[in-house]
Each structure stands twice: as C-alpha cells, then as structure tokens.
Image (cartoon, rainbow, N blue to C red):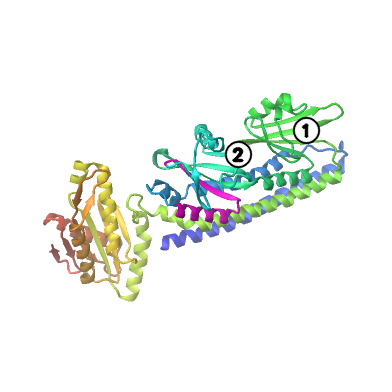
Amino acid sequence: MAITNTHLKQSRRFAVVLSALLLSGLGSLSIFSYLRSRQQFDRQMMTEVLPLTSDAVAANIDNLISQPVLASRLAADNSLLVDLLLGGNQQAGAIATYLRSVQRSTGVSTAFLVSEQSRKYYSPSGLVRTINTASAQDQWYQRFLDSGRAVELNLDRDTADPAQTLAFVNVRIEGADRQLLGVAGLGVDVDFLRNKLAGYQRDYGARLLLVNKAGEIVLASDDSSGRLAELPDIGKLSRAILNHPKMALQLDSADSYYYVNAIQILRSGWTLVVIQQPNAEEEALRRLLIQNTVAALLIGCLLIIVGRLTIGRDQEKLEQSATTDNLSGLLNRQAFAAIFADLASADSRSNAKLAIALMDIDHFKRVNDTYGHPAGDAVIRAVARAIKASVRESDPVFRWGGEEFLLLLPMSNLDQAMARLEALRSHLRATEIQLEPTDARTSITLSFGLTLHRPGESSATALDRADRALYEAKRTGRDRICVLDQMGLNSPTS
C-alpha cells in the first residue's frame, strides 16, 4: 500500500540522518575529550592516576545487558506469541519454531516460553516439561511472578540442559487488561558476559563487579564471588552502595587508596561496582582514552545497525497496526485516503471502473440490546471474515465505523460488483453466526449502497452517493442492494 511505502521511505531517510548525527556526535565528543585530556596531561603532571570514568564502563555494560533485554521484550510483545498463548490448544511445534527463529536472529544460547495457563515450559527443541514451583529447579518462575517486575535478569541452570548455566532475561507476557499469559525470555552464555567483564578489566585497568539486589556478586571480572558486604573496606558501605542509583567513593586501605564507582543498571536490577587502584601511568591513560573513542564509535555503529535491522523487521508491522481496525482486522479510515487515491488514479489511467460499496449490518442494535456488546463484536468479526472471503485479494475492505463497512472494487463495472455483493448477501443470509460468548446463534443480513467512481471526482462525492444508495436500501426494507449509477437512477434489488 502507498501509505506503508511512503512511511517506510520516510523512516529510512530518518534513520540515515540519525545515523550520521549519532556517529558525528559520538566521534566529535570522543575526540574532544581525548584532546582536552591530553592538553591537561601536557600542562601538568598528575599523581600517576586518573579516576576511572565509570560512566563510560557502565554505558558499555548497560549496552551489553540491554541488547538481550530489548530482544526479549520484542519477542514477548510479538502478536504471534500472544495468539499462541491465548489459544486453548497450544501448538508445541509452532511455539518451538518461533523460539528457534528468535534464537537464530538474536544469537543467544537459548530462548524459552512458559505458558501460565498450562505451566508448560517450551524451548527451541519443543515441549521440555511442566513447571512445578515446588521443585527447586522451577522456583524461579513463581519468584519472578511474585516480584511484580516486568523484566528480570538472573543466573540459573538451563531447564532444557541442566548442565549449562546461563544468564536469563525473563519478560512477562501480558494480554488485555494486564492479564498474565506467561513468561518468555532469552538465555545468554555466562562465559560470554564474564569474558566481556574480563576484557573491560584489561582495557580499563579496573576490577568490575555485578551485584544483585541481595548484595550477592553475580559476575566479576576476576572470577571472585561471595557477597559485597564481605569485601574489605567496601563491605561496610555495601548497603549504601546498593541503595543509591549512583555513588563515587575514595577509600583508604592499609597501604594505599583506591576509587569506587557504583552505578545501578536499571534494566537488569544489578549494580555495577568499579574498583580502580590509582597506579596507571600517563601513557596508559592516553591509551585508555583512545580506546574509549574507538569503543564509543563502535557502540554507535552497533546501535545504528541494530536500529536499522529493527526498523526493517518491525516497520511493516507497525504500519499495519496503525492502519488496521483492532476488532475486525480490516483496514480503518486512516488507510482509506492513500489507497483510494492510488486506485482512482490507476482506474483513470486505464479507463477502468472503480466500484464503491457501503454496507451496513441490519438490526445490529437489536443484537447488542438482546445479547450484549461482546455478541455484537462477534457479529462484526464474522461479517468481516465473510466480506474478505467473498472478494478478491486486491479489493480493499474497510471497517467504516460501528456496524458499517466499505468495499472498493477496482476494475469492476456495476454488473461485476453486483454479482460479488449478491453472492456475499446470499452467503450471510444462509449462515448462522455464533454470538460469543453466549451459545445463541443467528443469521445476519446486510444492506448495500453501490456506485461507480466518476473520473476526476473526489472521494467525498463518491462516498456521498454510495451513502445515499445505502440509505435507500435501508429505507425500502433492508437486506438488499441499492445502486446509484452515473445517471442518478436508484435501482434497488433484493
């Protein structure tokens, strides 16, 4: 559709401009920081140390953690996954296929899904087992639900492979009215995260600790473990460190002093603690600044690549959501103008006809008053399915408002349009519709107003003519097709 293509082009242009600004901004900022620091080094000698810029380290760690968190959120928000969980008979094969695609696209060690309805645990290989929160292996599930958090990051053994320990990103999946449908997430190799921390220690000359809310050291750049409260000197301040979003300290030890920087990484619930001994030489500090410059540019490039891939994968879905009626699944009024302009222009060039049909469900208020609005919604969905099944794939169908629908029939004269509408009318009259959530069933009739678009006229003029034809069909008894042709003749059929 033209509306989608136009928005995609605009998004791509925006992404190019944003990429250029981001790279130039990061590059300029990093180069400026390096030159300014170098001038300071040239003007005076320092004490052989420079406090570690923990914000830069935290940004790298946060970026490292946020990627699987973002991927887990996108996976959990996928409408296909919600539909699979809402279905009464969950298809293990479809869920496994979806999880394999998530695993391949993100490059993580595993992906998983737990259905709250059935408590079944699925992995990319299929159904693994049924969750039993009484067992130690599955207590994480209930703990996560009881925490009320939308996202949790924790270390645990893989349910599908107990010999493997992973860093799991758990994300709640919710339906309408915040109904809990289950938990999905990704498992990242712990060694990968540990090696990253070790690499940052080599690059920045600092010891890095990731500490959870309970004060336990989850990961460390030097493979240390235990509790933050047990560390010399720092231990007495562990409570203050964990309770503040950001803290910088200078501590004295028996024979030296050192800097401690602590930053909470909100998306993970962890606190990054950076410990540096002030014994680096000037050349090492200059080398560190250069590395920061390169790292910032690389992170910028990575963010741009991830953003572009995300736009390419999700833009069409977002556009479809913006132009689709939530109840019926049909196009909405927002999509009409661009689609009509394209079809009218094409028909004008080819001297073909564009038929326009307005349709209204007869006695729809009676259904709502008798059976309730959920039953009325079921009728609208059933009529939408019937219309889509009765027309060509190239015929746009819109929910025009309430119980009214609009159908565009390109390259169709009145006789061809009448034949399609008559088939739809007859089909609905002979079909009983289940009035969910009740057990009642009923048949539905439609009234139709049909006209042909005249070359050069506006959509408003053509729609007004179709609306007058529909009014005539309702006035003369409903369940009929009324045509207002180009000569202004009104010809009802029933």
- Check if residue 35 falls in the magenta segment: no
* Mark 1 or mark 2: whose residue is earlier in sequence: 2
Give the extent of the magenta segment.
Answer: 92-117
Residue sitting at 20 percent across and 59 percent down?
448
Q: Amino acid at mark 2?
A: Asn
Q: Quadrant of residue 480?
A: bottom left
Is the Cβ of the residue at disc 1 closer than 8 Å to that at disc 2?
A: no
Residue labelled with disc 2: 154
Q: Residue at x 27, y 60 (%)?
A: 387
Number of marks in the image?
Answer: 2
Q: Position of residue 126 (x, y in %)?
A: 50, 52
Q: In the shown orientation, is residue 77 left or right of residue 472?
A: right
* Image side of residue 262 versus residue 128, left or right: right
Give the mark toward the camera: 1 or 2. 2
Residue 108 is inside the magenta segment: yes
- Which quadrant of the rendered structure holds the N terminus? bottom left
Give how far across and how far down residue 87 sits, in percent. 38, 48
Give the residue pinned by disc 1: 259
Q: Secondary structure at mark 2?
A: strand
**Residue 42 location, quadrant:** top right
Residue at left offset 67%, top offset 26%:
240
Q: Secondary structure at mark 1?
A: strand
Q: Does 336 sit above or below residue 352? A: above
Assess disc 2: are there few (<14), some (14-19) or many (≥20) residues with their C-alpha within 10 Å of its C-alpha. Answer: some
Task: Please provide percent x and percent y for residue 299.
Answer: 67, 51
Q: Is residue 465 above or below residue 352?
A: above
Residue 260 visible at all: yes
Report whether 162 appears left or right of 380.
right
| Closer to us: 318 or 455 | 318
Give, as a three-letter code, the residue at label 1.
Answer: Tyr
Q: Nearer the viewer, residue 111 or 400?
A: 111
The percent coordinates of residue 252 (x first, y second) are 81, 27
